[in-house]
Amino acid sequence: MKTLSSLNHLFITIFLHNFSAVMVIPAITDVTMSALCPGRDECSLAIYLTGFQQASKEEGDGKTVAIESSLLDSLSLILLNIHGDPSHHRAWNVGDDAFNREYVGQVWPESFAYRSIEPCNSSLRNCTSPDIKIFIAAILAYSRTRHFFYAYYVAKTLIAMVCEGSVPCLALAYVADNVPEGRRASAFGILSGIASSAFVCGNLSTRFLSTASTFQVSASVAIASLVYMRFFLQDSIIDEQLTAPILTSKGKPKGKGKDYATNEIPSKNVQIFKSAPSLEDMLCLLKSSVTLSQAAVVAFFYSLAEVGLHASLLYYLKARFHFNKDQFADLMVITGIAGTISQSLLNNLQLVLMPILAPALGEARLLAVGLFFTCVHVFLYSIAWTFWVPYVAAMFSVLFVFSQPCMRSIVSKQVGSCEQGKAQGCISGISSFANVISPLVFSPLTALFLSERAPFHFPGFSIMCVGFASMIAFIQSLMIRIAPPIANEKVCNSNYVDA
């Protein structure tokens, strides 16, 4: 049985990996512009290529590698629910055994944890993602000319489509498989904090390095991460004393029902995951509750705006205010610090403040508060009249804390415990769809209004359109009226049956 102190090697590995990954983010815009459109602050081709890359490597949380700590936070909540942490269950109104069995059997583990764990045998050491990361970083560390940039672009796009996000998934699985239930919440929190600190430190380092040195240091740190992992981080060894490990000692997922609650290994083959829900099942689920349908609309437009902003913002700031990697690093350091504060607030909200504020204000109102500040954040970017306005807008990141937990909690109360996995997976699927189409919509719009072909002069028009998408989500959140919680029965009769 491992203790938190015995996870130090994992924490160091994750810090080095994330540090290496985020270092290149502030510099990659300058490198792309320099390779494709030398001497210019606007390049439509660069915007199109970046938008396509973001759409093609869309993950479950919809974000790029820029903020892997967000994925860690989301997956932490998932694994806490899977492994039975009661405090988080109560905070999300999903605290019974029926939910655990249904949650494990439906969407989240299959799409996040198990799909990423199984190819690597639940082992960071056996996963190829860190090895490949070194190859990608080494390309631009060697040269940043056009041909080398295209090699980097193709390699990163193809590789990201296969294994983007595998490292945080495996890190969470490593913790869950080796830490007692009572200590998992603390371990997940520390892991999320490590990722956030790496984000801040990586961007801060880029601020004081040249562009060439940034990629060279990133490649060196990636090598150090791999070497450290190979020499010091032991493979995940399943402790059969744990009451709910993800995998059995034979490396297979635990079954449902009795096999899930105990450490007995099934004596016969068991269908681990249920069949994928059909479109008809999803439509039936959404039609079963007006509130659930409204939450789906909020999730779609919120994700559309969030990813659209990431796809367009850096190119807009470069064209509008001639920002370079130093200013981008400053903005990301501010965002990273604000995100760390938000995570601390989120933990307090889930465990302490949410039970107090939710009955007084209502979860729908708390959701609206978070979305309102999202709108302010985006609109400030779009109408920025001088260079310091984006820095002020970045500080609003700390006020987004209410959106995701409130939306997920609202959804959880609209279905019975036996359909929690399907409901949460449906919302995540809608968000993922928005994450795919968002850069395909906003990248061409950004390229148009930053070029000389713009129908009228408004460089921030695409960012304002992103703000309109977030405003739709905000207005829809104002219309949500929370229905009484659904009892523990299925709301739809579908072919989505138990294994």
Image: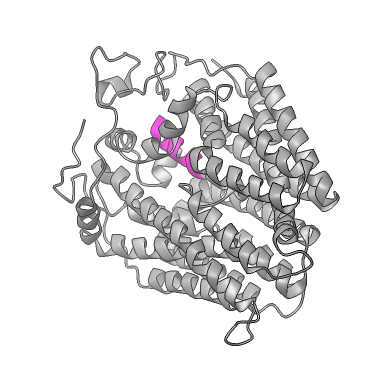
Look at the image and say whether residue 5 sits in the magenta stretch.
no
- x and y percentages locating residue 155 in the rendered image: 60, 42
- x and y percentages locating residue 313 in the rendered image: 63, 66
Task: Choose between 379 and 259: the one closer to the eye.
Answer: 379
- At a point 19% along the width and 54% down the height, the residue shown is 280
- At a point 34% along the width and 54% down the height, the residue shown is 411
Q: Visible in this render: residue 87? A: yes
- x and y percentages locating residue 33 in the rendered image: 72, 61
Instruction: Give the residues in magenta.
Output: 74-86
Q: Is residue 161 left or right of residue 15?
A: left
Look at the image and say whether residue 81 sits in the magenta stretch.
yes
- The image quadrant where one finds the N terminus is top right
Q: In which quarter of the view is residue 396 placed?
A: bottom right
Q: Is most of the magenta stretch helix, strand or loop?
A: helix
- The image quadrant where one finds the C terminus is top left
Q: Taking 117 as reference, is 290 above or below it?
A: below
